[in-house]
Amino acid sequence: MHPLRVQIEDCDQPFELESVGYFVRKLPKEPQKNIVYQAYVLFSERFKLRGGKIKNLRLTLEKNMPIGSGLGSSACSIVAALVALNKFHDEPFSKMELLEMMGELEGRISGSIHYDNVAPCYLGGLQNRSVISASRYLSSMNGIGYLLTLALRFQPQRLVQFYRKITLAKI
């Protein structure tokens, strides 16, 4: 059994959402209130702005993580849905564009846009939004540098990220 899985396949209808798994009974009954449905809507809107055509699809969410437990099940659902939708549509969005959408969707649940759950889920490890932006900036400069950010939730650790190399250091 997987903690969470999203599967996408072709279908005859424009969009179908199926929810299965141990914790499915705790998901909203109305599909429009499900964060995976909202991920589909946001992806579709952004893709259409680029002139893309959304394929008919059936999205199956297998939810075996406790909901509302603080384990990041909503972040996992958001990340899995957007990554699957992006792959199904031949990857029209970059990692950074997907991450922006992920933060927006996480904000719908928590009340403000943030990346502290979706970024580590998507990119791995400890992440900080300012690091992601600065990494993009350094990359565009072809510079070599390092970024130091305090991992607030994991004190007293500090994450020292060398461009192209990550080292964890206790301070």
Image (cartoon, helix red, strand yellow):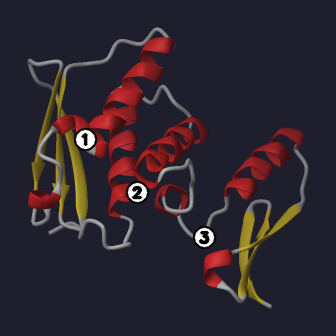
In the image, taking residue 123 as reference, residue 78 lies left or right, namely left
**Residue 31 coordinates in the image, percent (x, y):** 17, 37
The residue at the point 74 percent across, 48 percent down is 133
Callout 2 secondary element: helix
The residue to which callout 2 is attached is 75
Callout 3 secondary element: loop
The residue at the point 74 percent across, 57 percent down is 131
Q: Residue furthest front?
A: 111
- Whichever of callouts 2 and 3 sits on the residue coming sooner in the sequence is 2
In the image, taking residue 67 as reference, residue 98 lies left or right, namely right
The residue to which callout 3 is attached is 126
The C terminus, quarter of image:
bottom right
Q: Quadrant of residue 163?
A: bottom right
Callout 1 secondary element: helix
> Mark on residue 45?
none
The residue to which callout 1 is attached is 33
